[in-house]
Amino acid sequence: MISVSLGIFAYNEEKNIGQLLQAVEEQVLETVQLKEIIVVSSASTDRTDEIVRQYMKKDPRIQLITQEERKGKSSAINLFLKAATGDVLIIESADTIPAKNTIEKLAAPFYDETIGMTGGRPEPINNPKSFIGFAVCMLWKLHHKMALISPKIGEMASFRNLVKEIPEHSPVDEASIESIITDNGLKLKYIPDAIIHNKGPENVSDFIKQRRRIYTGHLWLQKNQDYTVVSQNSGLIIGLTLKEFSLDPIKDLKIIYTMLLEVWGRFLGWFDFKILKKVPYKWDISESTKDLGKS
């Protein structure tokens, strides 16, 4: 039976870490074993560590690694990679919630020895009736459609235990792992029914901040690991976006505004990387993406 090590990465996640650990403990597993749950808390100053320790008393699989200084998610992932002992490793941000069978669906494909990495489908809880909610849901819908064409891993990634470390200054950890896995001659696989609930930004400022950081990260990845994710294929993105247009003028206007925000975010990301020489591996938190108990 395949053994799984789950790594959860947290910075001040008291609003969500408890319900995340509860969701992990309630996973329905049939062909894989969840061997250990390792939480890496990066200099959290709220009740995150306290909540994790409460769960540790009830579940011996849970471990807590604390960083005195916040050094970025990739640094935290490297601590997990050193500690994990499972056949398959799963990394998950602490501001997400997996569906009941997500770990099983992400890990079971590794019985095929050609598979090196899998990813599920993030589904935002944002209200699509608001403009920003619509923009968030639309971007993840496009992410899903792109991943069906060429796997793109995000929010929760599963991979064979062969990655010893990733570049500590990588702002796009899953994509850095994609690069290493494909360099080893293994395949990526998208699992569209492995659902991960997340929460996108709820205001324009956080939306642009997030899109800006991600684009900067992908430029860094191209330069430092010579790897390009499918979402950098502008022609594919434009083609999929055009198919979203309908005869509904309100919806079409929202699509246009979303496209403009994405273009602006990418321009700012380009400016940060090319002109300011900034690498956002330790990024500012978008507070509105926290607390999945609210939408």
Image: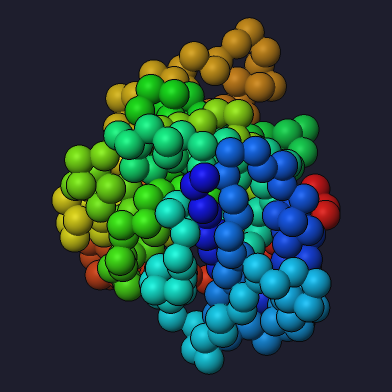
- Colour option used: rainbow
**For residue 165, what is the image quadrant?**
bottom left
Q: Nearer the viewer, residue 197 or 259?
A: 197
Q: Nearer the viewer, residue 271 or 2?
A: 2
Along the horizontal axis of the image, is 15 left or right of 171?
A: right
Q: Position of residue 158 (x, y in %)?
A: 46, 48
Q: Residue at x 70, y 55 (%)?
A: 24
Q: Nearer the viewer, residue 169 or 77?
A: 77
**For residue 293, what is the image quadrant?**
bottom right
Residue 286 in sight from this viewpoint: no
Q: Is residue 178 above or below residue 172?
A: above
Q: Residue at x 37, y 57 (%)?
A: 161
Q: Position of residue 109 (x, y in %)?
A: 46, 34
Residue 7 in sight from this viewpoint: yes
Q: Is residue 271 above or below residue 187?
A: below
Q: Residue at x 61, y 79 (%)?
A: 64
Q: In the image as oriented, which residue stretches furthest toward the top?
A: 247
Q: Is residue 260 above or below residue 193?
A: below
Q: Is residue 176 above or below residue 261?
A: below
Q: Position of residue 259 (x, y in %)?
A: 48, 34
Q: Position of residue 220 (x, y in %)?
A: 26, 59
